[in-house]
Image (cartoon, helix red, strand yellow):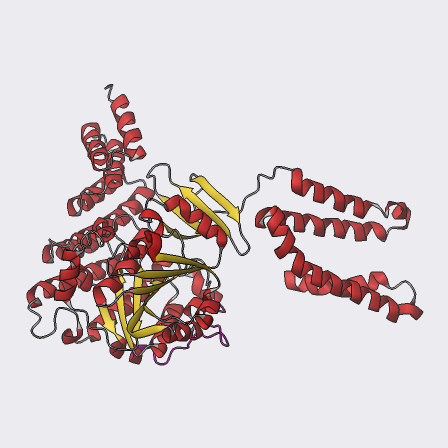
C-alpha cells in the first residue's frame, strides 16, 4: 500500500501543476525537476542532517508530520475561497521544524519484546540503528538491543556468546588470531581475550552506538575487551573482508537475527561465507550461531549454503540452559578437517581453567559435556540438504521468504528443526562422533553422555509436539539417570521443567506449577531465580514455611538478586515475621 501511494504522488502533482493545457509540457517538466530535486534532498537530508540532529525516532515523527502538512497544503491550495492562505503551508513547515527541536516527545519505538519494565541505561539513535542497553531490575541482568532485537548481554544471550568464544579454543591448537564479526555487548570478544593462546582479536562493528553502549558491560568484558589484544574497526564487515590483507585462525560470527521475521540475510549468504573462507588461515575455522527456531525451510537453506561453501562442516546443538530461552545451533566450517580431540581439550581446560570460566555457569566444565553436543558432519548433512536452495546476494531467498513460514509459532518451528537434527544424529556413524572413535579410551563415558543427550532431545521434541507432561518428564528423568554427573544436562533439564511449569502457571494450576518447579530444582538447584519463583508457587498453594526457605536459598545463592530480597521480605511480612 505505501508503495502504491508513493507511486501516485507524481501523477497527482502533475495534475495539480498543469494550469493550462497548451503549457502542459513545461508544467510537467517543472514538476519533474522539482520531484528530482526532492529525491536528491530526500536521500541526503535524513542521513546527513535529520538523524544527526534529531535521531531516528524523532526524525520519523517529523517526516510523518511534514507529509501531513504537505497533504493539507495541497488540499487548501485547490480551494478557491482559501487561496489567501497560500502561506499556511510554509508557516506549518516552520512550526513543525521548531517543534522538532524543542518539543519533548515521549514517543519511543519498542526497545525489546515484552521489556516495558526494563530500566533504560543507554538509548541512542545511530547512523544505521537505534541501540539500547536495558537493565532487568529483578535479576540485574543487562541486555543490548539494536532496533528492538536483543544482540547481547548478561541474560539469555550470554549462553551463545560463551559458546562462540570458547568452542573454537577446544577444537584448534593455534587460535592466535581471531576476527569477531559484530561487537554487540563485547562479551564475546572479552571472553575470547581471556585465553592466553589468543594474541590478537579484530572486532568489526558497523554501528558506533553499539560501541558506545558496550561500555555498560565493561565489567563483563574483562578489563575492557581484553585490553591491547582487541582492536575495534568501525566498518561494514563485507567491506572489511574484501579489503583486509590479513587472515585469521578463527572467525566468530554472531549475527543479529529476529525471531518474528527474516532479517540480515547477507550474514547467511554464500557470498558472505566465501569472503570468510578467503580470510581463513590454513587449518583455521569459522564458527557461526544460528537460532534453531527459524522456519524449517530457512534453517535448511542456511545449512545448505554453509555446507556448499566449506568442505568440512560440524553441527553442534546446545539447548536452552537455566532460564535461557535460546536454542543454539552452532555451525563450524573449515577448509581442512577439524578433528575434536578430547585429551587435548581436557589439557587446555585444566591448564587454563580461568579462561573457560564463562562456561561454568552453564555446567560446561568438561570437554566431554561439550563434545556430547556434536551432532553430525558435512558427510551426513549434505545429502539431506542437497536439494534445498541456496541463499546468495543475487538470489536473496532468505529474506524473500514465504510469509506463511512465520505463521507457525516458534515452538512449532523448533520442533520441526529438532526432528531434523535427530534424523541427522541417527545417520551419523559412531566412529565419527568425538570420543567414540576406536581407541579413544572414553567409549563408556561418551556413550552414556550421548544416550542422555538423545533422551533429552526426545523429551524436548515430545514437549514441543504437545505430549502429556508425564511422558516428557519420563524422558527428562531418564536423561539425568544416564549421565547424572553432567551439570550442563541438568541445567537444560531444569529449563525444560521450568518451561512445562510455566504452561501450568498460565492455566492457573498452582499445584502442578509448584511440582514441576520442584522437579526442576531437584535436577539443578543452583539457580537463584529458580528458587525465588518456586517460593512464589509454594505461597500460592499455601506452603508459606517452605516458600520462605526457598526464597532464602535463592538469596544465599545470589545476595544481589533484588527479586529474592523482595519476595523474602513479602513472605516474612505475610507470616508476621520481622
* Viewport quadrant of the C terminus: top left
Q: Position of residue 145 (x, y in %)?
A: 44, 50
Residue in the picture at 70% in, 59% down = 41
Q: Is residue 374 in view?
A: no
Residue 85 vs residue 357, the one in the foreground: 357
In the figure, 285 relative to 125: above or below? below
In the figure, 196 relative to 249: above or below? above
Helix, strand or loop: magenta stretch: loop
Residue in the picture at 36% in, 45% down = 218
| Residue located farthest toward the front when viewing the structure as drawn | 228
- Does the segment drawn in magenta span residue 398? yes
Q: Position of residue 382 (x, y in %)?
A: 30, 78
Residue in the picture at 87% in, 71% down = 25
The stretch in magenta equals 384-402
Left or right: 196 as drawn, with respect to 83: left
Residue 1 vs residue 343, the one in the foreground: 343
Amino acid at each position: 500500500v505505501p508503495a502504491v501511494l508513493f507511486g501516485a504522488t507524481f501523477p497527482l502533482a502533475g495534475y495539480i501543476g498543469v494550469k493550462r493545457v497548451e503549457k502542459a509540457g513545461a508544467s510537467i517538466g517543472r514538476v519533474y525537476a522539482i520531484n528530482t530535486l526532492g529525491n536528491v534532498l530526500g536521500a541526503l537530508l535524513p542521513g546527513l542532517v535529520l538523524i544527526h540532529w534529531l535521531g531516528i525516532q524523532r526524525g520519523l515523527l517529523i517526516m510523518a508530520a511534514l507529509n501531513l502538512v504537505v497533504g493539507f497544503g495541497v488540499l487548501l491550495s485547490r480551494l478557491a475561497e482559501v487561496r489567501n492562505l497560500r502561506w499556511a503551508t510554509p508557516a506549518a513547515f516552520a512550526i513543525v521544524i521548531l517543534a522538532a527541536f524543542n518539543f519533548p516527545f515521549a514517543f519511543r519505538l519498542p526497545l525489546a519484546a515484552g521489556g516495558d519494565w526494563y530500566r533504560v541505561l543507554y538509548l541512542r539513535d545511530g547512523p544505521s540503528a537505534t541501540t539500547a542497553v536495558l537493565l532487568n531490575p529483578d535479576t540485574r541482568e543487562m541486555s543490548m538491543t539494536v532496533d528492538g532485537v536483543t544482540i547481547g548481554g548478561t541474560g539469555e544471550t550470554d549462553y551463545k556468546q560463551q559458546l562462540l568464544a570458547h568452542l573454537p579454543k577446544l577444537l584448534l591448537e593455534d587460535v592466535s588470531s581471531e576476527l569477531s564479526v559484530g561487537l554487540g555487548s563485547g562479551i564475546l570478544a572479552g571472553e575470547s581475550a581471556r585465553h592466553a593462546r589468543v594474541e590478537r582479536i579484530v572486532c568489526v562493528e558497523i554501528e558506533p552506538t553499539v560501541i558506545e553502549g558496550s561500555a555498560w558491560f565493561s565489567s563483563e568484558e574483562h578489563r575492557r575487551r581484553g585490553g591491547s589484544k582487541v582492536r575495534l574497526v568501525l566498518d561494514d564487515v563485507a567491506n572489511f573482508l574484501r579489503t583486509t590483507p590479513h587472515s585469521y585462525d578463527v572467525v566468530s560470527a554472531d549475527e543479529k537475527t529476529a525471531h518474528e521475521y527474516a532479517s540480515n540475510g547477507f550474514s547467511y549468504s554464500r557470498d558472505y561465507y566465501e569472503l570468510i573462507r578467503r580470510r581463513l588461515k590454513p587449518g583455521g575455522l569459522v564458527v557461526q550461531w544460528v537460532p534453531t527456531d527459524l522456519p524449517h525451510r530457512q534453517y535448511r537453506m542456511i545449512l545448505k549454503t554453509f555446507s556448499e561453501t566449506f568442505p568440512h562442516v560440524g553441527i553442534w546443538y546446545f539447548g536452552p540452559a537455566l532460564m535461557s530461552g535460546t536454542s543454539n545451533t552452532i555451525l563450524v566450517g573449515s577448509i581442512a578437517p577439524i578433528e575434536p580431540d578430547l585429551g587435548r581439550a581436557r589439557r587446555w581446560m585444566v591448564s587454563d581453567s580461568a579462561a573457560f570460566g564463562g562456561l561454568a555457569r552453564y555446567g560446561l566444565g568438561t570437554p566431554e559435556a561439550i563434545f556430547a553436543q556434536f551432532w553430525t558432519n558435512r558427510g551426513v548433512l549434505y545429502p539431506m540438504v542437497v536439494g534445498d536452495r541456496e541463499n546468495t546476494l543475487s538470489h536473496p531467498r532468505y529474506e524473500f521468504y514465504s510469509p506463511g513460514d512465520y505463521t507457525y509459532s516458534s515452538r512449532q518451528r523448533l520442533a520441526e528443526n529438532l526432528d531434523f537434527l535427530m534424523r541427522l544424529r541417527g545417520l551419523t556413524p559412531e566412529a565419527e562422533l568425538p570420543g567414540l572413535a576406536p581407541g579413544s579410551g572414553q567409549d563408556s563415558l561418551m556413550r552414556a553422555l550421548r544416550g542422555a543427550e538423545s533422551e533429552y532431545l526426545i523429551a524436548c521434541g515430545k514437549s514441543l509436539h504437545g505430549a502429556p507432561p508425564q511422558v516428557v518428564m519420563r524422558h527428562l528423568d531418564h536423561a539425568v539417570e544416564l549421565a547424572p554427573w553432567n551439570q550442563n544436562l541438568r541445567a537444560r533439564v531444569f529449563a525444560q521443567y521450568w518451561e512445562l511449569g510455566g504452561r501450568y502457571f498460565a492455566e492457573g494450576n498452582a499445584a502442578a506449577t509448584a511440582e514441576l518447579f520442584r522437579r526442576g530444582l531437584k535436577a539443578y538447584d543452583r539457580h537463584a531465580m529458580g528458587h525465588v519463583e518456586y517460593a512464589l508457587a509454594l505461597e500460592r498453594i499455601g506452603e508459606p514455611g517452605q516458600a520462605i526457605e526457598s526464597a532464602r536459598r535463592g538469596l544465599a545463592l545470589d545476595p544481589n538478586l533484588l527479586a529474592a530480597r523482595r519476595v523474602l521480605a513479602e513472605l516474612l511480612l505475610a507470616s508476621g515475621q520481622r
